[in-house]
Amino acid sequence: MADRAIGIFDSGVGGLTVYREIARQLAGEEYLYLGDTGRVPYGTKSPSTVLRYAQEAAAFLVSHRVKMIVVACNTASAVALADLEERFRLPVIGVIEPGAHKAVAVTRNRRVGVIGTEGTIKSGAYTRAIHAIDPQIEVVSVACPLFVPLVEEGWAEHPVTRLVAEEYLAPLLQHDIDTLVLGCTHYPLLKPTLRSLLGDDLTLVDSAAETAKSVREVLHRDHLLRLSPPAAPRFFVTDLPTRFEQVGGSFLGDLLPNVQQVEIG
Ligand code: DGL
């Protein structure tokens, strides 16, 4: 079991930020990554549709005999994690709880902001996860639907993105938050822009980095750390690989080898 791959899925290319963090912290593992590029975005779709897509993506990874499933997509984690945990008999890790734990640990004034897709914010999943740890924390959430296309356009640090960010962040700043959870796969790439707007006193919580720590802890706890030499990662997509390779390459700062188109569901 320990020598099987770690399965990671996302609606598309964004989950590569999560893959990058996990692969950095656990270089000796083998990875299977599925980007559901034929059906992206998940963030604007209804919970029942996202649930079905997530079930199909997870089933694809399980059919490839992975030892663990990482739900890299915040929207899918928000609506489908409990269902996937029940459905599959292997560890399933989402990105919401690790980010929520970190936010609770670092906030000093107990005012936390959360940004994400419409689906993630409407689900209230981050607020629930934070309140499960500390109900006294004030959570202010804002959906930022324009961030995903801007980042995929390669405009993470463009002046247009800065203007958009100013609009989105205004209500959060009115609440005097001291911590901001980046609740979407694409947002780690916005850190320089957000940092320049928010200053150094506000803590940015990167769900991707926190999730990688959880993956490491669970593998360690369950004695599932790989013993064989590492194998090359494999990438699967549900549409033509070209755009995934281009945008994904810029996310990773590296070429994406072995991208294969598959049908799921
Ligand atoms: N991966 C999604 C998330 O983290 C963002 C892209 C989408 O809407 O599918 O919520």
Image: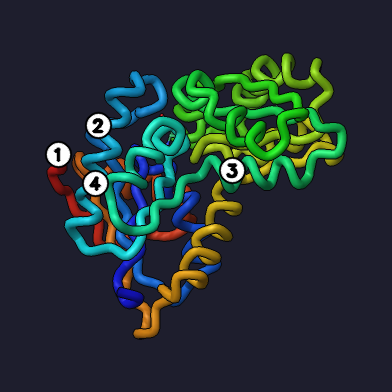
Which label was assigned to residue 188?
3
Query: Looking at the picture, how far across and down is residue 124, in whole percent?
Result: 54, 24
> From the viewer's perspective, is the residue at label 1 or at label 3 nearer?
1
Q: Relative to the observer, which residue lies in front, 67 or 90?
A: 90
Query: Looking at the picture, how far across and down is residue 72, in whole percent?
Result: 43, 46
- Tell me if mark 4 has few (under 14), some (14-19) or many (20+) residues whose alpha carbon lies within 10 angstroms of its own: many
Is residue 57 visible in the rendered structure shown here?
yes
Alpha carbons under labels 2 and 1: distance apart = 9 Å
Residue 240 against residue 147 in the figure, above or below:
below
- Tell me if mark 3 has few (under 14), some (14-19) or many (20+) residues whose alpha carbon lies within 10 angstroms of its own: many
Query: Looking at the picture, how far across and down is residue 118, in whole percent?
Result: 48, 20
> From the viewer's perspective, is the residue at label 2 or at label 4 nearer?
2
Question: Picture quarter containing residue 63?
Answer: bottom left
> From the viewer's perspective, is the residue at label 2 or at label 3 nearer?
2
| Lower sequence index among marks 2 and 4 | 2
Which label was assigned to residue 237?
4
- Tell me if mark 2 has few (under 14), some (14-19) or many (20+) residues whose alpha carbon lies within 10 angstroms of its own: some
Q: Which residue is mark 2?
A: 52
Circle 4 — which element?
strand
Alpha carbons under labels 4 and 3: distance apart = 22 Å
Residue 241 against residue 146 in the figure, above or below:
below
Amino acid carrying label 3: it is Pro
Q: Is residue 157 found left or right of 228 in the rendered image? A: right
Alpha carbons under labels 2 and 4: distance apart = 17 Å
| Lower sequence index among marks 1 and 3 | 3
Alpha carbons under labels 1 and 3: distance apart = 30 Å
Residue 208 against residue 215 in the figure, above or below:
above
